[in-house]
Image (tube, grey):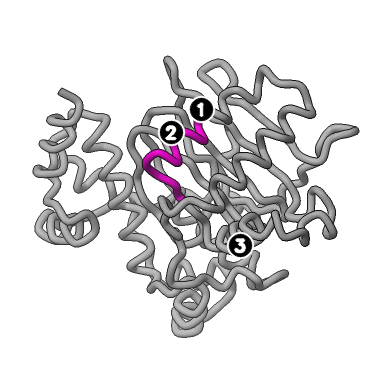
Amino acid sequence: MKETVALQKPTLESIKPSFGHSFTCTWFDADHQNNNQTWHYHPEIELVYVNGGTGKRLIGSHVSYYQKGDLLLIGSNLPHCGFTEKLSGRHTETVIQMKPDFLGDEFLQVPEMREIQILFERARGGMAFSGNTKKEVGNQLRQLKEQDEFDQLLTILSVLNRLGTSKEFKILNANGLSLEAIGRDNERIERVFNYVRTHFKEHISLDEIADLISMTPPSFCRFFKKTTNKTFVQFVNEIRLVHASKLLAEHHLGITDICFECGFNNFSHFNKSFKKFTGQTPSAYRDELKTIIQ
């Protein structure tokens, strides 16, 4: 019998810059870890730089696995959770949070801010940056900790302008995501996300998940597809496959063991699903990682 757990409501995170500041900068490392692993959202735009290491992206309805660090820009009220489960060695995480109008509405309307205006609009779906953009911006963000408040502001403006002119990005929720809903609908979808993150290794029936948010299974299926542009089964399997990617990269478990550890109960189905999701079989994926490391 599945253990009954208390349901955790989605969290509206309250972010308050210290007096005299229009933004927040937070740094995490092995001694000071980001423990906010639940789905949450806030009106502030969030810029996250993970210096090295691997981890999971869970932003909106997008789930994926990254290697060699990450650089993300997350728009206002876009649900997400912490990106690093454990930091060690040189791996660090920098998080900057700011209101879209953190410099005032009039300042954002000047012609020189046009690229940043477009950037904030794109960030509504979540953005992952790569290539030279990630490297250059990462170097700038690492310097923030040693700067005074005024230089930090100048650096953040420079970074936003660099991101606004970059072509090295991917929109994570490219097919759209209905995240403008407030109140009950927002609470429902985030409750589902939180539950799946906790129970993805187990069988989750439609009856079970629909009952969780007081809906019938057919109504839930329509609601979930309309909100995320994915079926519920597709979303659960993506969560499982991202976890499989992590285990293939970081552990020495056999591929059959990983299949069952991630919640799949059929090895053939796991192989086919993993290849469709990543373009490679689990064994080829692991072999390629070994080659990269060597």
Residue 79 shows in the view: yes
Q: Which residue is mark 1?
A: 139
Question: Left or right: where does residue 21 sit relative to residue 239?
Answer: right
Is 3 located above or below residue 233 in the figure? Answer: above
For disc 2, the neighbor class at 10 Å (few under 14, some 14 to 19, many from 20) is some
Q: What residue does disc 2 label?
A: 135
Q: Callout 1: few (<14), some (14-19), or many (20+) C-alpha neighbours within 10 Å? A: few
**Residue 256's image quarter?**
top left
Residue 232's quadrant in the figure?
bottom left
Queried whether the magenta region covers residue 134, the answer comes back as yes
Q: Position of residue 254 (x, y in %)?
A: 13, 36
Residue 82, given in percent of the width and then of the height, sits at 54, 40
In-front residue for pair 254/47: 47
- Residue designated by label 3: 118
Give the camera-side residue of 68 and 148.
148
Residue at the spot x=65%, y=53% of the render? 41
Q: The residue under label 3 is which amino acid type?
A: Ile
Q: Is residue 1 visible?
A: no
The reply, left or right, for residue 116 in relation to residue 238 is right
- Along the line of sight, the residue nearer the viewer: 194 or 44: 44
Please state the extent of the stretch shown in magenta in the rendering: 128-139
Badge 1 marks a residue whose secondary structure is helix
Is residue 157 one of those drawn in magenta? no
Q: Are marks 3 and 2 in contact (CB under 8 Å)?
A: no
* Residue 48 x %, y %: 55, 39
**Which residue appears at 46% of the width and 64% of the height?**
173
Are the two marked residues, 1 and 2, in contact with CB atoms closer than 8 angstroms?
yes
The residue type indicated by label 2 comes to Lys
On the image, the x and y values in percent for residue 212 come to 54, 66
